[in-house]
Image (spheres, rainbow, N blue to C red):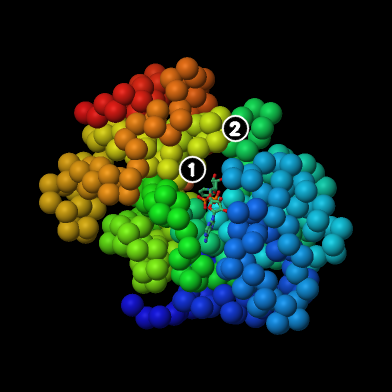
Amino acid sequence: MPRSADWTYPTAIRFGAGRIDELGDACATAGITRPLFVTDPGLRDLAITTRALGVLAAAGLRAEVFSDVQPNPTEANVDAGLAALRDGGHDGVVAFGGGSALDAGKIVAFMRGQRRPMWDFEDIGDWWTRADPAGIAPIVAVPTTAGTGSEVGRAGVITNIATHTKKVIFHPRMLPREVILDPELTIGLPPAITAGTGMDALAHCLEAYASPSYHPMAEGIAVEGIRLVKDYLPRAYRDGADIEARGQMLVAAAMGATAFQKGLGAIHALSHPVGAIYGTHHGLTNAVFMPYVLDFNREALWDKVDRLAAWLGLDGGFSGFLDFVLRLRRDLGIPHTLDRIGVDDARFAELAAMAVADPTAGGNPRALSEADALDLYQRAYDGRLG
Ligand SMILES: NC(=O)c1ccc[n+]([C@@H]2O[C@H](COP(=O)([O-])OP(=O)(O)OC[C@H]3O[C@@H](n4cnc5c(N)ncnc54)[C@H](O)[C@@H]3O)[C@@H](O)[C@H]2O)c1
Ligand SMILES: [Fe+2]
């Protein structure tokens, strides 16, 4: 693998160890002179953040830090960030962190010149056309986890605390202008977060691939993304300083988000309500549901997953792939049942109603009824496959 590369698909990407040193140049290219640096409280005082801020200072860019972003960010986080952006006279955003900080930063930049409330831009029909594109501030995105791929996405996920639902805010111009994928930034990720975020990348690739809509380009990206997760996630989990594995996982995450414009499916549909109500980690929650949903989709996926297993060098077609997922989860210390991530069975009926209403449910290769969702929650609680 080359040590660094530059891509312009789906946006301008600078890939390689140490390329955070180009953050000032990335801002200049994006047209940002006074960035608001959006991150989260866990990252605020880490050495990687100090380093990134140092790069900006050395480039003569006066950045201000906004770090009031919680995991599964809320409207209040966006409002506070927007106030910081407007009050500080910032002309762009550096979004630095995991999916939570990236999503919050992207939406803050998007909202800068909008006159309507954020919920008016939910990803429904053509609601995005309500936005004034001239009011969107440029974004440079720097992921510090390898999972969501939000850095190459045109949307952000915000929890509506009034309804306990996760909503997707979308605009094509929310796509960051410049992205830095630097594996040195993910070296310090604790193994549990490496595992959970990496499984989110796998869920994106797998659900994009499985989704029935016609998008062969996205499918091609998804299958190679799955191979990268298979080959490199266990390595990154075992040895956080394995720079090649960290780099390949950043690429796999970006590929997952590039592919999932084709669609997602029941893994995400079941997971979103759980994340919104119980505050569980998104990728970890997806990982718990993954084999149950695969099993549920079995009939619809025989041929496709046969081809996928062949590409991955796995014997046994569909069953071989399902075994691989179960083995991978075990190797990464991911629980097999919902109770072990703090989810009880008291609210399954409510969760099932929310799951079928989630926008990702429609992308599942097999129709997901409320009864199916209820059954899947129960199976994931009991640990029942097949
Ligand atoms: N926009 C999208 O397309 C998209 C896709 C999937 C998920 N999401 C959203 O992304 C969020 C989840 O993002 P995530 O999984 O990256 O987790 P996260 O951003 O919530 O981060 C998890 C934790 O890891 C810490 N962390 C991040 N980088 C670190 C590093 N390098 N070293 C040490 N600690 C570090 C953070 O401080 C935080 O405590 C959810 O809100 C989810 O809904 C968005
Ligand atoms: Fe996801």
The numbered mark at residue 357 is: none
Q: Secondary structure at mark 1?
A: helix
Disc 2 marks which amino acid?
Thr
How would you rate the neighbour count of disc 1 (Cα within 10 Å): few for under 14, some for 14-19, many for 20 or more? many
Would you name the residue on which mark 2 appears? 165
Residue at image location 36% in from the left, 22% down from the top: 378
Q: Amino acid at mark 1?
A: His
Q: Residue 106, located in which quarter of the rendered image? A: bottom right
Labelled disc at residue 282: 1
Q: Is mark 1 within 8 Å of ligand 1?
A: yes
Disc 2 under 8 Å from ligand 1? The reply is no
Image location of residue 382, percent across then percent down? 31, 24
Residue drawn at the location 59% of the way across and 50% of the way down: 100
364 up-or-down from 181: above or below? above
- Quarter holding the N terminus is bottom left
Quadrant including the C terminus? top left
Which residue is pictured at 51% across the width and 78% down the height?
A: 18
The one nearer the camera, 239 or 200, is: 239
Q: Nearer the viewer, residue 29 or 383?
A: 383
- Determine the residue located farthest toward the left in the rendered image: 316
Mark 2 burial class by Cα count in 10 Å: few <14, some 14-19, many 20+: some
Residue at screen point 75% across, 69% down: 63
- Whether 193 is drawn above or below 58: the answer is above
At numbered mark 2, what does the secondary structure look like: helix, strand or loop?
A: strand
* Mark 2–mark 1 distance (CA, rounded to whole Å): 13 Å
Q: Is residue 266 above or below residue 35?
A: above
Q: Is residue 63 left or right of residue 254?
A: right
Where residue 275 appears, as percent x and y from the top left, is: 52, 36
210, above or below 378, in the image? below
